[in-house]
Amino acid sequence: MKRERNGGIWDFEHGIVPATGGQDLILGLDGGTTSTVCISMPIFPFTNGSLPPDPPPVIARAVAGCSNHNSVGETAARETLEQVMADALSQSSSTRSSVRAVCLAVSGVNHPTDQQRILNWLRAIFPKDVKCFVHNDAVAAMASGTMGKLHGCVLIAGTGTITYGYTEDGREARAAGAGPVLGDWGSGYGIAAMALTAVIRAYDGRGPQTMLTSNILKELQLSSPDELIGWTYADPSWARIAALVPVVVLCAESGDEVANGILLDAVDELAQSVKAVVLKLGLCGQDGKEECPLVMVGGVLEANRKWDIGKEVISRVSKEFPKMHPIRPKVEPAVGAALLAWNFLKEESRQEAFGS
């Protein structure tokens, strides 16, 4: 078996006796700025026209922290990825020898060099015959809504935000997703950062008074806006800031104009990202009237509030692309990552059968 390191992460394998004719597995991993999820899924049959079961069976699910190397650094990110994969296999009572394919979809994979670096590292962990894939987390999000098919547009708005698009002939494009320093406006971080800024501006007398002041101070158990400076820079992690989004939504629902304006700006930013990707790839045709799926993923887009950011984004997008239909995935992105790997194995099996 491949390397043994990282404080005995794989020690559990010594106590597992591989079963003769045991079940082959796929590992699907969704790594984000807030959390990382890895699931193990059995390989179901490859038959002509076969589709994955709905919902796909999940044998085990493991959760860990942030695995975005831009946020926590390369070493910490890799340790998180390796630990969560080991945990998923341990819960499955399986070892790496049972794995047929691994698909990692991780935020922060923004360039082919990122992809290749993680791919090389991943191949050093698993046996040589294991198929390994590395993508941005947007790919898994798309697959979670389309059951493993890459075609259409996906909008992710959680702690961060990114929009990706894919054509059936393999072209792809993206918008946003450059991180908070370069303006992930429309994300949870972007919304909360604008709210914190509004509180400071109101306190200074540079901006209008807002309910955000009292509500955010209450949420953070602070007594004065000037304490926000110390709170923010004591731990300026993206997820910690983004956790204030529900407070902003609550204030907007209560009629606060400043909070309402922040959410409207977020809606505009998210809709513009979708529009940019659709136009780059021509996903809705030259006249904008062709059908195209829009997979919507992330806490900011959850349809469980009176002030529904996701619904407002759909309304904006539909004005220009009336046949773009939103999809709220029934399965989580980690399952989408596993389905991507399954589809690859299915296509490989089809080609081998055709070649024979």
Image (cartoon, grey):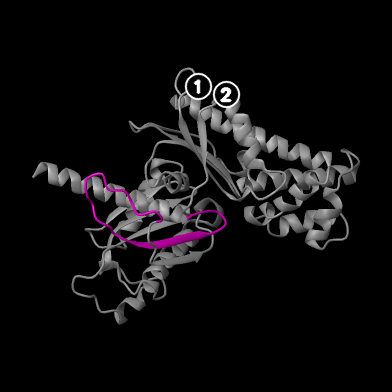
Which residue position is annotated with label 2? Answer: 320
Residue at mark 2 to residue at mark 1: CA–CA distance: 7 Å
Which secondary structure, mark 2?
helix
State left or right for residue 351 relative to residue 82: left
Q: Position of residue 306 (x, y in %)?
A: 72, 46
Question: Looking at this rendering, what residue extends furthest in the bottom direction?
Answer: 15
The vertical placement of 170 against 199, above or below, is: above
Query: Viewer-proximal residue, 186 or 206?
Result: 186
For marks 2 and 1 on the same chain, the one whose residue lies earlier in the sequence? 1
Query: What amino acid is found at the position of numbered circle 1 in the picture?
Result: Gly
The secondary structure making up most of the magenta span is loop
Q: Residue 39 lies in magenta, yes or no?
A: yes
Q: Quadrant of the C terminus?
A: top left
| Residue 165 included in the magenta stretch of the image | no
Discs 2, 1 touching: Cβ within 8 Å: yes
Question: Residue 353, percent across and down?
Answer: 13, 46
On the image, which quarter does residue 285 sit in?
A: top left
Q: Which mark is residue 288?
A: 1
The residue stretch that appears in magenta:
31-55
